Image: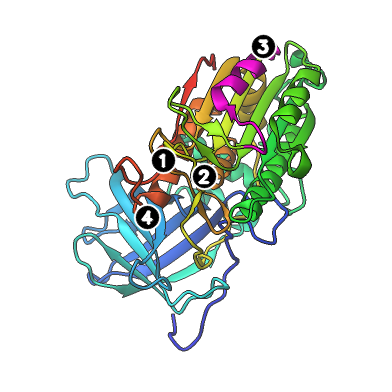
């Protein structure tokens, strides 16, 4: 790859800036030649900068074709924010099974990235040699590339990914198209999907001088995410957005009181704003206009409505005294993009139709602050990414709220772990209490 020219790739916007579509995943191929003259090809599935799956195929010095797999997480260098790296970890050789030599996970370094996601050069190195080797990357057109011959280079036919990826070759993709897992044999009629309504109450402190714009973006993107997911599944969707003059205790309680909930409905309350811990609970209190409300109190109110599934989700500080959401600043756009969302209706059904019970979640533990990045709540960003991967037709996730929240907490912690909290811990550590039957 020439260092004289900047290569332009489609962009990933961590905060989904200027993008109304719900983004999903995309595929790339990276090629390079090692110091040992071995030619390597990496198949890269990119969900977000913290969710990257990689498989590398190569023929070794003994003429044995080998495949290794590992995961990557992306970050910008502390010392030079223009350098973006996908760091590989925990590589495992999956073919041949009896291979004696292991494989060291690769790192993919994009140098001199700028605000538009352009970069100067791609370098590859592993944790052992540290030698930087130039590589080439190209985006994969699944419809044209995902043949049996191509997929056999990286997957066993028995693997679920093989069948899923092969099915994409027969699907015309469009950023404005509603996607499913293309399994026409799935029968949802027995679930009476049209009799199910997903109720979303989103409460956001949009008028606050410091975090107003951040919470407004949180509200916009989460509402859009649930709208698209429920439309794909075929259930009803009703939203209540409480902000500006409605951002108070009276309107929250009256909205909950006036909801008409059937026994098979789903009820979700999402809060984005200031918060603090009043000392009476491990969960925080929402800092509203006028009187405040404890997150646990709201959860009890929601549960009393009798929905089949009740979720209470808070993106707010849990510090001992009232505190504003800390900003981690802005980052450059990464030089990779995500394509259209590939919904798996069976996974959506597990989340919204089959799951029963309740869950209350908060973005940080008692004594911790919650953070924002690029103008969005750090947890909310992580929640959206985890949701999209959990219901993707080309991910290994199975459609579990528990797993979804676990991944969201993990990603939010990863993004914020260089920041010290009030209690001396580092980064925000979300948690939940649930009584789910999945």
Q: Which mark is residue 286?
A: none
In the drawing, does residue 173 fall left or right of residue 258? left
Q: Which residue is at 26% across, 71% downward? A: 37
Q: Residues within 10 Å of mark 2 (few under 14, many from 20)?
A: many
- Marks 2/3: CA–CA distance: 29 Å
Quadrant that contains the N terminus: bottom left
Residue 409 screen position, x and y as percent? 44, 38
Q: In the drawing, what numbered circle is on residue 410? A: 1
**Marks 3 and 4: CB-CB under 8 Å?**
no
Task: Rate crowding at label 1 as few (under 14), some (14 to 19) or many (20 or more) other CA atoms within 10 Å.
Answer: some
Residue 380 placement: quadrant: top right
- Nearer the observer, disc 1 or disc 3? 3
Residue occupying the point 74% across, 15% down? 191
Which label lies toward us, 3 or 4?
A: 3
- Is 300 magenta? The answer is yes
- Residue identified by numbered label 2: 382
Q: What element carries label 4?
A: strand
Disc assigned to residue 304: 3
Rendered-image quadrant of the C terminus: top right
Foreground residue among 139 and 354: 354
Residues at marks 4 and 1, CA–CA distance in whole angstroms:
25 Å
Q: Name the residue under label 4.
A: 56
In the image, which residues are magenta?
288-307
Q: How far apart are marks 1 and 3 (CA)?
A: 31 Å
Whole-number angstrom distance, CA of label 2 to CA of label 1 = 8 Å
- Residue 248 place in picture, x, y as percent: 70, 34
Sequence-first disc among 4 and 1: 4
Task: Report, in whole angstroms, how far the alpha carbon at label 4 lies from the one at label 2.
Answer: 27 Å
């Amino acid at each position: 790859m020439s260092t004289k020219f900047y290569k332009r790739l489609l962009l990933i916007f961590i905060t989904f800036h200027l993008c109304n579509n719900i983004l999903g995943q995309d595929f790339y191929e990276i090629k390079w030649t090692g110091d040992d003259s071995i030619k390597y090809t990496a198949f890269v599935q990119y969900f977000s900068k913290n969710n990257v799956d990689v498989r590398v195929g190569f023929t070794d010095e003994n003429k044995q074709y080998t495949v290794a797999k590992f995961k990557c997480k992306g970050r910008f260098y502390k010392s030079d924010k223009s350098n973006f790296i996908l760091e590989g970890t925990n590589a495992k050789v999956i073919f041949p099974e009896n291979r004696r030599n292991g494989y060291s996970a690769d790192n993919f370094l994009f140098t001199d990235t700028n605000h538009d996601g352009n970069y100067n050069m791609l370098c590859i190195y592993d944790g052992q040699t540290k030698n930087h080797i130039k590589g080439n990357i190209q985006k994969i057109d699944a419809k044209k590339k995902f043949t049996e011959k191509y997929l056999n280079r990286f997957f066993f036919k028995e693997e679920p990914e093989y069948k899923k990826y092969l099915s994409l070759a027969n699907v015309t993709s469009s950023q404005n198209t509603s996607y499913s897992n293309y399994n026409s044999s799935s029968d949802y009629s027995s679930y009476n999907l049209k009799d199910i309504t997903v109720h979303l109450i989103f409460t956001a402190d949009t008028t606050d001088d410091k975090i107003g714009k951040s919470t407004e973006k949180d509200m916009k993107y989460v509402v859009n995410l649930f709208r698209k997911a429920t439309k794909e599944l075929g259930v009803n969707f009703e939203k209540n957005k409480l902000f500006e003059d409605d951002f108070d205790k009276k309107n929250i309680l009256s909205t909950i009181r006036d909801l008409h909930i059937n026994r098979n409905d789903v009820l979700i309350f999402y809060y984005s704003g200031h918060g603090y811990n009043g000392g009476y609970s491990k969960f925080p209190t929402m800092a509203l206009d006028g009187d405040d409300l404890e997150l646990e109190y709201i959860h009890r109110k929601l549960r009393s409505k009798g929905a089949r599934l009740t979720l209470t989700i808070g993106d707010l500080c849990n510090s001992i005294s009232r505190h504003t959401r800390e900003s981690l600043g802005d980052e450059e756009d990464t030089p990779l993009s995500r394509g259209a969302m590939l919904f798996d209706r069976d996974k959506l059904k597990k989340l919204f139709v089959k799951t029963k019970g309740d869950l209350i979640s908060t973005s940080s533990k008692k004594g911790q602050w919650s953070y924002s990045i690029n103008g969005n709540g750090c947890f909310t960003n992580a929640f959206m990414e985890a949701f999209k991967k959990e219901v993707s037709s080309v991910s290994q996730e199975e459609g579990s709220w528990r797993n979804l929240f676990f991944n969201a907490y993990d990603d939010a912690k990863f993004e914020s772990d260089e920041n010290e909290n009030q209690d001396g811990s580092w980064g925000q550590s979300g948690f939940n209490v649930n009584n789910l039957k999945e």
